[in-house]
Image: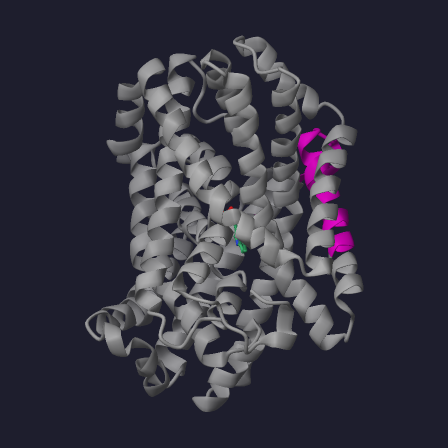
Amino acid sequence: MRGGLKSVHSRWSNHFAYVLAATGAAVGLGNIWKFPYIMGEHGGGAFVLVYLLCIAVIGIPVMMAEVSIGKCGRQSPAYAVKKLAEQSDASWGWRSIGWMGLVTGYLILSFYAVIAGWALAYVFYGISGEFINDRESISSLFSNLNRSPLPLLGWSSVIILTTVIVVGNGLKHGLERAVVYIMPAMFLLLVIMAIYAARNGDFSQTLSFMFSPNFSSLTVNGVVVALGHAFFTLSLASGVMMMYGAYLPEETSITQTSLWIAAADTLVAIIAGLAIYPIVFAQGMAPGQGPGLIFVTLPLSFAQMPFGGFFGTLFFIMLVFAAFTSAIALIEASVAYLIERATFKRWPAAAISGFGIWILSLGTVMSFTGFEVTNFKFAVFGEQIEASFFQMIDYLTANLLMPIGGVLIALFVGWAVKPSLLKQEFQRDMLIYPLWRFLLRYLSPVAILLVFLTLIGVINV
Ligand code: TRP
C-alpha cells in the first residue's frame, strides 16, 4: 500500500503484489501462535472443523465483501463505505463499520506487540544457545521472561517503536518487498519442522487430535472462539482488507484472490498445528496450557534437531517478521485517520498512535506477569467471570467486535449496496456471484446471530 490516504489512486503493480501483501497481513501470530493454543484449549478436531467451516462460509464471503467495498469506494474504510452508501441511497450510518474496524485494529495491536515481543526475546535466546533439550529449562525460559514486567515491557516497546519508525517514515514498501522472501522461507521452515515433528514426535496422536472430531469436547464458547478466530486470522473487520482493496487494479478478480489468501492462511495454521502437537504429545504436555504453548514446545524440538540453534533462531526471526508485517497493517488505519482528519504529518501521527498502543500494551504486559490489578472479576448474564486484561481485549476484539463488524459488513454489502455497483466487480465470476450473495445476505448474518444468541443463553443447546 502506498503512503496512506494521500495517494488513494495508486494501485498495486499486479495481482501478485496484492496477494502477497494481503497474505502478509493475514499470516501472522494468529496462525502460528494463536491457532495451535486455542485448538488445544477447545478440544482439537471438532474445533478445527468448525473453524474451517467458518472460514469457508463466513470468512471468505466477508473478505470478498470488504475488498469490494474498498475497490468500489477507492478510499480509506469509513469514506469508502460512505461513498458506496451514498451511491446506493443508503444511510450514512453504515460508516460506523469503518470506525469499528479502526478501533478493533488498534486494540489488537496492543496485545499483538507483546506476543511479538516474546518472539523477539526468543530470537536472542536462540542466538545465545538457550534452546537445550530439557523440558524444565525450556519452561523456565518462558516463565522467567514473564516473571517481572520489565523484560517483557522492553521487548514489546522495541516492537512498537520499530513499527512507529517504519510507519512514520513510510518505509512500508521495502518491508513488503522483504516479505516476498520471508513468507515462502517461513512456510518452508514450518514444513521442515512438521516433517521433523512427525518423525520424532507422536504424529498419530496429533492426527487423531486434530482431524477426528469429538463433538462432546466442543462447547458453545468454543464455537464462538472458532468463529472469532476465522475473522482474526483473515484480518477481517479491522479495516485492512478494505484499505488494500482500494489499491486493487481494475481487472483483478476479487473471488480468486480472496480464495488464494484464505487458502494460504489456513494452510499455514494447519501446518503450524502439525509442527507443534507431535512434540506436545511426545513430551506429555497439556494441549490446553494457553498462550505460552509454542514458546515451550518449539524450542524443545529445535534442541533435538541437528543445527537446531540455527534453525530455531531463524524461525523466531521469521515469526517476528510475520508479526511485524501484520503490526504495520494494524496501525495504518489509525495513522491514516490522524493524517486525514486531524491534519497531522505522518511522523507525529505514527508517534501519537504508537504511544496510545504502548499505554494499552501495559495492561497485557501486566496480565502476563500476573499483576492482580489487571485481573477482573465480574458477572455476565449471571455467570461469574474472572479474566485478565489480555483475555478481555482478546475476547472483545476477536469474539465480539470482529463478528459484529462482520455481520454489519455482510448486511451492508448484501442488502444496502445496489447490486448494479457490485455486479461490475464480478463480471468474470458470474457463477460465483449468486452463491456469494446468498451467503452474504442470509447465511453469514444468521449463523453469526445464532452463535451469539446461544452464547448469551437465549437459545439452549
Ligand atoms: N491476521 C493477523 C494474524 O493472524 C491478525 C490481524 C487481525 C491483523 N486483524 C488484522 C493483521 C489487521 C493485520 C491487519 O496474525
Residue 325 vertical placement versus 352 (above, below): above
Residue 173: x %, y % from top left: 59, 58
Residue 4 vertical placement versus 57 (above, below): below
Q: Give the range drawn in magenta.
A: 354-381
Residue 149: x %, y % from top left: 76, 31
Residue at 38% across, 54% down: 261
Q: 453 or 334, which is in the foreground? A: 334
- Residue 379 is at least partly visible in this image: no
Left or right relative to 291: residue 306: left
Q: 129 or 79, which is in the foreground? A: 129
Residue 48 vertical placement versus 299 (above, below): below
Q: Does the magenta stretch include residue 203?
A: no
Residue 84: x %, y % from top left: 47, 83
Q: 220 or 193, which is in the foreground? A: 193
Q: 289 or 382, which is in the foreground? A: 289
Residue at 55% across, 48% down: 178
Residue 32: x %, y % from top left: 47, 37
What secondary structure do most residues of the magenta stretch adopt? helix
Residue at 42% across, 26% down: 276
Q: Does the magenta stretch include residue 365?
A: yes
